[in-house]
Image: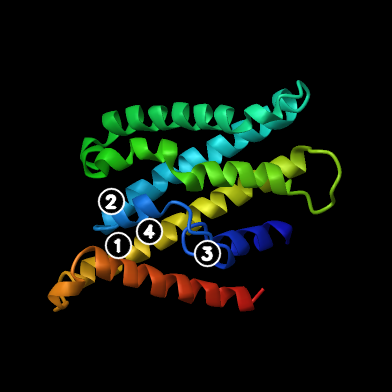
């Protein structure tokens, strides 16, 4: 039951994009086509899940025991950068078309504040419903939270891409074309997702 609450909370109630406003740059930049948005979401999900797993272990089994917690942000960014390089190499070999479509936004996952934000949130909030020392259950909850946050990121990106594809067929006033209408849609989607906070 705890995992279901974490998933619902991360995907709908505290959506990383639409409630916490982390990762807006790729959200607005890559959400022109659904296929590109889904590819970016998959890459972010992979990086977010692995980086949370690695950074959690580094925090509790390296940084904290050595009393060098102040190095947290630097270490986390290095881990995320290494994982993004791995994703970039894999995508270039497996799907060159998706690699080209993502363009500059793929390396920008390294500086995507959503990925770093989730890694830091997991450590600072210490996902442990029972409290106590960090352990396997906390690690499992942390990874579930990271994957659910990535799914929320993907849901928001895909919805936005679908709406923007439909807008290409609509008659949008000249003043609202491009970024202005994208920002308006993002605001409306954020208000809609904030409505979920009344459920839980």
Do residues under tags 2 and 1 come within 8 Å of each other at their CB atoms? yes
Q: Position of residue 48 (x, y in %)?
A: 51, 42
Disc 3/disc 4 C-alpha distance (Å):
13 Å
* Disc assigned to residue 45: none
Query: Are the two marked residues, 4 and 1, in contact with CB atoms closer than 8 angstroms?
Result: yes
- Label 3, secondary structure: give it: loop
Tell us which disc is closer to us: 1 or 3. 3
Q: Name the residue under label 2.
A: 36
Taking the image as drawn, is residue 140 in sight?
no
Percent coordinates x, y for residue 87 in the rendering: 39, 32
Asked if residue 120 lies left or right of residue 112, the reply is: right
For disc 1, the marked residue is 161
**Mark 3 or 4, which is nearer the eye?**
3
Question: CB of mark 1 within 8 Å of CB of mark 3?
Answer: no
Crowding at mark 2 (Cα within 10 Å: few <14, some 14-19, many 20+) = many
46 to 131, vertically: above or below: above
Residue receiving disc 3: 19
């Amino acid at each position: 039951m705890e995992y279901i609450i974490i998933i619902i909370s991360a995907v709908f109630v505290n959506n990383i994009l639409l409630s916490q406003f982390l990762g807006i740059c790729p959200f607005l930049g890559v959400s022109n086509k659904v296929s590109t948005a889904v590819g970016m979401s998959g890459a972010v999900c992979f990086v977010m899940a692995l980086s949370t797993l690695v950074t959690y272990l580094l925090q509790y089994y390296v940084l904290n025991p050595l009393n060098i917690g102040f190095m947290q942000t630097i270490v986390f960014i290095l881990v995320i950068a290494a994982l993004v390089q791995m994703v970039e190499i894999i995508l270039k070999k497996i799907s060159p078309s998706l690699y080209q479509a993502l363009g500059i936004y793929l390396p920008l996952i390294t500086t995507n504040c959503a990925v770093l934000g989730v890694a830091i949130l997991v450590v600072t909030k210490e996902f442990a419903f029972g409290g106590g020392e960090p352990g396997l259950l906390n690690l499992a909850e942390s990874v579930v939270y990271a994957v659910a946050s990535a799914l929320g990121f993907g849901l928001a990106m895909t919805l936005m891409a679908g709406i923007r594809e439909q807008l290409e067929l609509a008659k949008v006033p000249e003043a609202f074309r491009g970024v202005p209408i994208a920002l308006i849609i993002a605001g409306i989607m954020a208000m809609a997702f904030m409505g979920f906070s009344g459920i839980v």
